[in-house]
Image (spheres, rainbow, N blue to C red):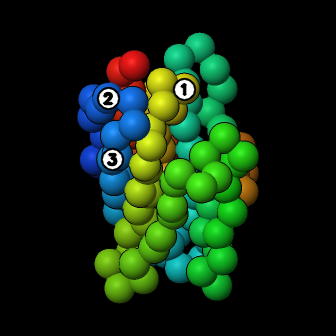
Amino acid sequence: QVQLVESGGGLVQAGGSLRLSCAASERMFRMYTMAWYRQAPGKQRDSVARIFNTGATNYADSVKGRFTISRDNAKNTVSLQMNNLQSEDTGVYYCNKWPLTGSDYWGQGTQVTVSS
């Protein structure tokens, strides 16, 4: 059974930090590269950070140097440390596997709002 439960969002002032967490089902966590996605108001959902099973990571240019993705293999969790948040980081954040297949299950996401 697929499980994706995101948490840790909130309201923060520009320049502040948040740490998001995602609990994933063991099967998904072990089989796939995991990613954090962001859906800004009125925009499509895009990947902002990915972490491979090897531990390698990559980031969208817009968050590079500010966000850090990590995974805890013992707990099947993926985290996203977000520093120096800016207003353009506002959106709903989701975790999921990468790449997507087009018929993917999504969790409820967690809202991040950055006030300027």
Three-letter code for the amino acid on which mark 1 is drawn: Glu
Mark in the foreground, 1 or 2: 2
Q: Which mark is residue 36?
A: none
Q: Distance between the residues labelled 2 and 3?
A: 10 Å
Question: Can you identify the residue that label 2 sits on?
Answer: 13
In the visual, does 95 lie left or right of 62? left
The answer to whether residue 30 is visible is: yes
Residue type at mark 2? Gln
Residue for point 53% across, 79% down: 30
| Residue 48 percent coordinates (x, y) | 62, 47
| Position of residue 92 measured from the top left corner of the image (x, y, whole percent) | 44, 32
Q: Earlier in the sequence, mark 1 or mark 3?
A: 3
Q: Looking at the image, which is closer to me, 39 or 5?
A: 39
Mark 1 and mark 2: Cα distance apart in space: 12 Å
Looking at the image, which residue is at 51% across and 61% down?
68
Element type at mark 3: strand
Residue at coordinates 39% horizontally, 37% vertically from top-left? 15
Q: Which of 77 and 64 is in front in this view?
A: 64
As helix, strand or loop, the secondary structure at mark 2 comes to: strand
C-beta proximity under 8 Å, tags 1 and 3: no
Quarter of the picture holding the C terminus: top left
Q: Work out whether mark 2 precedes mark 3 in sequence or the reverse, and give the earlier one.
A: 2
User: How far apart are labels 1 and 3 at the CA level?
Assistant: 14 Å
What is the number of the mark on residue 18?
3
Position of 5 relative to 41 (above/below): below
The numbered mark at residue 88 is 1
Does 48 sit above or below residue 75?
above
| Rendered view: 99 above or below 92 | below
Nearest to the observer: residue 82 or residue 30: 82
